[in-house]
Amino acid sequence: MTISLPIDAGANELLSRNSLALLMAMILDQQVPMEKAFTAPRELVVRMGHEPTAEELADRDPEELAAIFAARPALHRFPKAMAARVQAVCRLIVDSYEGDPAKLWSTAATGTELLARIEALPGFGQDKARIFLALLGKQCGVTPPGWREAAGHFGAEGAHYSVADITDDQSLAAVRAHKQSMKAKAGKP
């Protein structure tokens, strides 16, 4: 799998080869710019001095993990809450997928099954789950039968709706324009 977001090459490289880093970025992708969410896993690696496993994060003292997330600059706008969410997802990965985040998607027989698995993750509502499914399909080659349908409009080819569609600065601008348009239609600033 090759992630090619308009972020630092080192962050893209980590996201491309480390399924936990990719999952963690998607967890953090809320209420912060996409660039912050998708570079945070690499910053966590730097702070910890190694690439943590799901087991390691699941078993880490919650206050210690929150402190790592909160160190300046914080990995997220809400570091304590996001550290807890990452830890909860890691516990589920350990309990349900033998500690291997990639098994979440690599063992799903259909897009519908994969969507249900993603929706079962703490903090993943319907839209976020569909966006992650679309990201896995469009950029990571995870394409079980029916994945586009399960991803809803986020799975549409040629769309510019979410991070699943971002591969460069131009597609990032198109996604941001779409989101601004949606906010304007909803009457939000």
Image: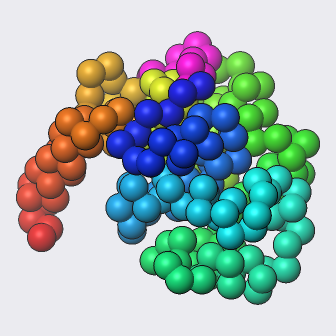
Q: Measured along the vertical axis of the image, is residue 42 above or below residue 19? A: below
Q: Measured along the vertical axis of the image, is residue 6 above or below residue 78? A: above
Query: Does the image show residue 155?
Result: yes
Picture coordinates of residue 78, whole percent (x, y): 51, 79
Picture coordinates of residue 40, whole percent (x, y): 54, 61
Picture coordinates of residue 37, whole percent (x, y): 47, 59
Q: Is residue 81 left or right of residue 183?
A: right
Number of marks present in the image shown? 0
Residue in view at x 71 percent, y 19 percent = 109
Q: Measured along the vertical axis of the image, is residue 31 above or below residue 122? A: below
**Principal secondary structure, stretch drawn in magenta:** loop
The quarter of the rendered structure image containing the N terminus is: top right
- The answer to which of 71 and 140 lies nearer the viewer is 71
Residue in view at x 60 percent, y 83 percent = 71
> Residue most toward the top?
145
The quarter of the rendered structure image containing the C terminus is: bottom left
Query: Does the image show residue 88?
Result: no
Q: Residue 39 colored magenta?
A: no
- Specify start and end residues of the magenta stretch as a single range: 140-149
